[in-house]
Image: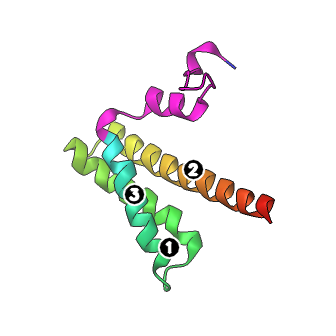
Amino acid sequence: MNEKWKVEGNNGRNNFFLALANQFLLEKALIVVVTLLIIGVFLKKTPRIPDWSIPWKLTGGGIALAWGVFGTINVQATIQGILAAGITSLGHQLWKQTKDKRESDES
């Protein structure tokens, strides 16, 4: 792995995803990630919204929220919204898959 992507964690492990977020996602856009996580929970619990549409809705919402946070509609804000939605979906899937795997290991 390229040295510029390494971030040392508390226990010395490399955290590739944290390095990517630090490299490409601006600090102002972190609130968009948190907001999208909350919105995603509500969308998931809404029975009339199919699961396949949630990532698309989060992407559109991420773009709109980033435009609001940055106060302008431009390419940078759009990319930040897309990145925020991607980090939200990836983070949720990592958590979900890890939780499911741990539960199946304990059975």
Secondary structure at numbered mark 3: helix
Q: Which residue is mark 2?
A: 90
Secondary structure at numbered mark 2: helix
Give the left or right position of residue 1, taking residue 81 as reference.
right
Q: Residue flagged by tag 1: what amino acid is it?
A: Lys
Q: Which residue is mark 1?
A: 44
Say which of 79 and 103 sits in front: 103
Q: Which residue is mark 3?
A: 36
State the count of labels: 3
Image location of residue 73, percent across then percent down: 26, 46
Asked if labels 2 and 1 touch by Cβ distance under 8 angstroms, the answer is: no
Asked if labels 3 and 1 touch by Cβ distance under 8 angstroms, the answer is: no
Q: Residue at x 67, y 53 (%)?
A: 98
Judge the density around disc 2: few (<14), some (14-19), many (≥20) Cα neighbours within 10 Å. Answer: few
Secondary structure at numbered mark 1: helix
Classify the position of the C terminus by image quarter: bottom right
Q: Which residues are magenta?
A: 2-28
Q: Residue furthest top?
A: 3
